[in-house]
């Protein structure tokens, strides 16, 4: 009984972070601002759901698979976010400014 409650709490926490990350992804104005919610919140959401599944499944060989999946999510989410940001800089995608104008040189001055 307690195992199901703990697993449900972790899955709800993960769902919350997925919703916050999706909302941030939709609401942010440019690619650089969108990288933060898409990488951080989705990583927290995925790892929370994985922890919930591990707690629900109990001690079995599936925990090893879940730990490997969580490790790949932690590693590759940050790596993909960095690659997207670097690609955007190389393509001179403009930063968003508060007054709605974009910076001309692509380097934020």
Image (spheres, rainbow, N blue to C red):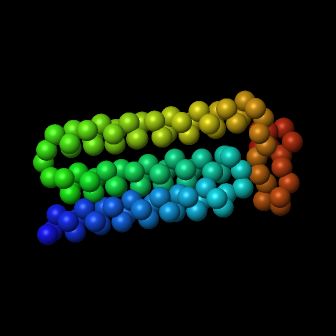
**Which residue is found at the position 28% from the left and 65% from the top?**
8
Find residue 35 and report its horizontal and vertical position in percent: 60, 47
**Which residue is found at the position 23% from the left and 51% from the top?**
54
Q: Quadrant of residue 98?
A: bottom right
* Foreground residue among 107 and 69: 69
With respect to residue 57, does 70 lie above or below? above
**Which residue is found at the position 15% from the left and 52% from the top?**
58
Q: Quadrant of residue 12?
A: bottom left
22 relative to 7 in the view: left or right: right
**Which residue is found at the position 58% from the left and 62% from the top?**
23
98 relative to 60 in the view: left or right: right
With respect to residue 100, does 32 lie above or below? above
Find residue 76 and report its horizontal and vertical position in percent: 46, 36
97 relative to 13 in the view: left or right: right
With respect to residue 93, does 97 lie above or below? below
The C terminus sits in image quarter: top right
Q: Which residue is situated farthest in the top direction here? A: 90
The N terminus sits in image quarter: bottom left
Q: Quadrant of residue 60?
A: top left
Q: How many marks?
A: 0
Find residue 103 and report its horizontal and vertical position in percent: 83, 46
* Foreground residue among 10 and 56: 56
Find residue 3 and report its horizontal and vertical position in percent: 16, 63
């Amino acid at each position: 009984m307690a195992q199901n409650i703990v697993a449900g709490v972790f899955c709800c926490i993960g769902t919350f972070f997925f919703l916050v990350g999706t909302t941030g992804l939709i609401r942010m104005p440019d690619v650089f601002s969108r990288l933060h919610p898409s990488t951080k919140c989705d990583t927290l959401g995925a790892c929370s759901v994985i922890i919930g599944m591990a707690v629900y499944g109990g001690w079995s060989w599936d925990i090893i698979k879940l730990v490997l999946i969580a490790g790949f999510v932690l590693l590759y989410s940050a790596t993909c976010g960095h690659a997207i940001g670097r690609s955007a800089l190389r393509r001179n995608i403009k930063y968003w400014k508060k007054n709605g104008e974009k910076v001309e040189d692509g380097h934020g001055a």
